[in-house]
Image: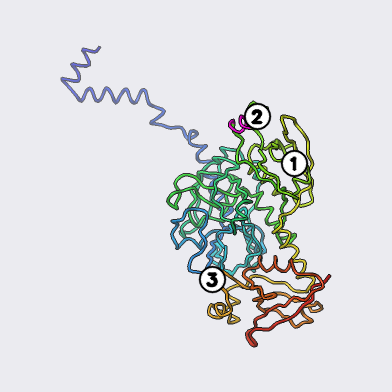
Amino acid sequence: MMRLHRVVWRDSPWVGIAFIATLLVRTLPSMAQTPAQSTQPLADLSRAFRHAYEQVRPAVVLIEATTRQQKRPLPPFHPEIPEDFRGMGSGTIVSDDGYILSNYHVVANADSIQVTLADRRTYRAKVIGFDSLIDIALLKVEAQELPTVQLADSDRLQIGDWVLAIGHPLGMGTTLTHGIVSALGRQAGVLNPRSDEENRYAIESFIQTNAVINPGNSGGPLLDLQGRVVGINTAISTRTGYYIGYGLAVPINLAREVVDDLLVHGRIVRGYLGVAMESEMTQELIRKRGLDMERPRGVYLKDVQPNSPAERGGLLADDIVLSLDGIAVNHFNHLQTLIYGRDPGETIHLQIMRQSQIRQVAVVLGEREDDRRFSEGHQRLEQLGLSVESLPVELALELGFGDELAAELGFALGEKPVVVVDVDPDGLAADKGIRVHDVITEIDQERVTSLEQFMRFVSGLDEGQFAFFWLWRPDTGINVRALMIPE
């Protein structure tokens, strides 16, 4: 046979080619005639992608935020993100009366926010509230009967699940990408809360995905194959500012906490334990502390804050938290996330290891000092009979409170007074002549620089004492009103 083949190839190459073709036809029929059913799973997957996209696309909006500052705070991508995309992001409509979820970094310090719907309608949006610790903001536009998304239970996600990302990357219009859940509870060190103090409390428990996410996707939804929202796309890990590997999304269960708190309480309400935790249990830490553990597990407490809920509950430095209400914890951000979902005053039951002994500890959660003072400031304003918000740029321009006037009154770039948005006609403020659209520039000779700073200052005013509110009006300029703080 070998000799015959050599003769045939040498004497008649066309015969050899015909022989090979015959072999291919006989041995590869499945490649030449692929059965339709072999591609059916891929066709089904494509249909699932299309259905999810068509179902959710109308509820994904483009957000354009502008500010009078020369530079906006950088989003949690990379310092080299192009300037054009720093004020651009996406949003997810979660109620038909105009509530929209997005990222805090998309709208941080914005003077004006414009929302463009899928049908090209545009609206001005205002920030209802935000939680910079998880990079989520809730916006509101004045519209009705808007398309909405369906929210899933992000706790049911598993590594390997298909996910889809929808948003407005790079201002190119609505875009769909796909991938899988690459990791859960991921910490990436990408959040930029409002202050260094808050940075200690930032909660990073991201869904990591290889679905392509770029600048402009922030605030858009991450979906399961049923088109339900499992996360809010937030960041990418990159050295270039563009996608090179994986994206990060805030689990929708965490974002839902923000929405519920803002709509029910008008502010963020989160549990507070008051401990400093080691980022990860390691064999080295076990050896160094002489712990009776075969393998690393639990969350190691480096420190317990004085007069904190943790101290009052009996926790000590060097304790190892093994579980919270029966849920095993092996990373500090998982423990943070569980506590975040509880309210101040709620009791949690911790299983801990102390000096190699397993113990049960019950702790009544408290509230962070900043959160408490903001709440007390809000309550005090209610007693005075007025409501305020950060002065929007459109209203500032309408009233004539421009950059030059702000500078004359001592305001630096990034500092904003508050404006009265509601006055109880039977309240103390109305009795003293305070009215809607009064701009509060100072209180007791303390210049107002932000809504948060104003609320904290108001919370510290002494009961039964007068406080002097410095107000600016277009017609009269600066006025001063003295209000007695109710006991």
Q: Earlier in the sequence, mark 1 or mark 3?
A: 1
User: Three-letter amino acid code at disc 2?
Assistant: Gly
- The residue tagged 3 is 413
> On the picture, is 59 further left or further right than 13?
right
User: Three-letter amino acid code at disc 3?
Assistant: Leu
Name the mark nearer the viewer: 1 or 3. 1
Q: Nearer the viewer, residue 324 or 314?
A: 314
**Magenta stretch encompasses residue 285:** yes
Residue 212: x, y in percent? 48, 48
Q: Residue at x 71, y 63 (%)?
A: 374
Q: Nearer the viewer, residue 184 or 460?
A: 460
**Magenta stretch encompasses residue 391:** no
Q: Quadrant of the C terminus?
A: bottom right
Based on the displayed image, in which of its 4 quarters is residue 483 positioned?
Answer: bottom right
- The residue tagged 1 is 315
Instruction: Tell me how far mark 3 sits from mark 2, CA to CA.
Output: 53 Å
Residue 376: x, y in percent? 76, 64
Residue 133: x, y in percent? 62, 54
Which dot marks residue 222? none
> On the picture, is 63 further left or further right than 264?
left
Mark 1 residue crowding within 10 angstroms, few (<14) / some (14–19) / many (20+)? many
User: Three-letter amino acid code at disc 1?
Assistant: Leu
**Can the viewer see residue 271 in this picture?**
yes
Residue 235: x, y in percent? 53, 51
Label 2 element class: loop
- The residue tagged 2 is 290
Name the mark nearer the viewer: 3 or 2. 2
Residues rendered magenta in the picture: 283-288
Q: Earlier in the sequence, mark 3 or mark 2?
A: 2
Counting labels gives 3
Q: Nearer the viewer, residue 172 or 389?
A: 389
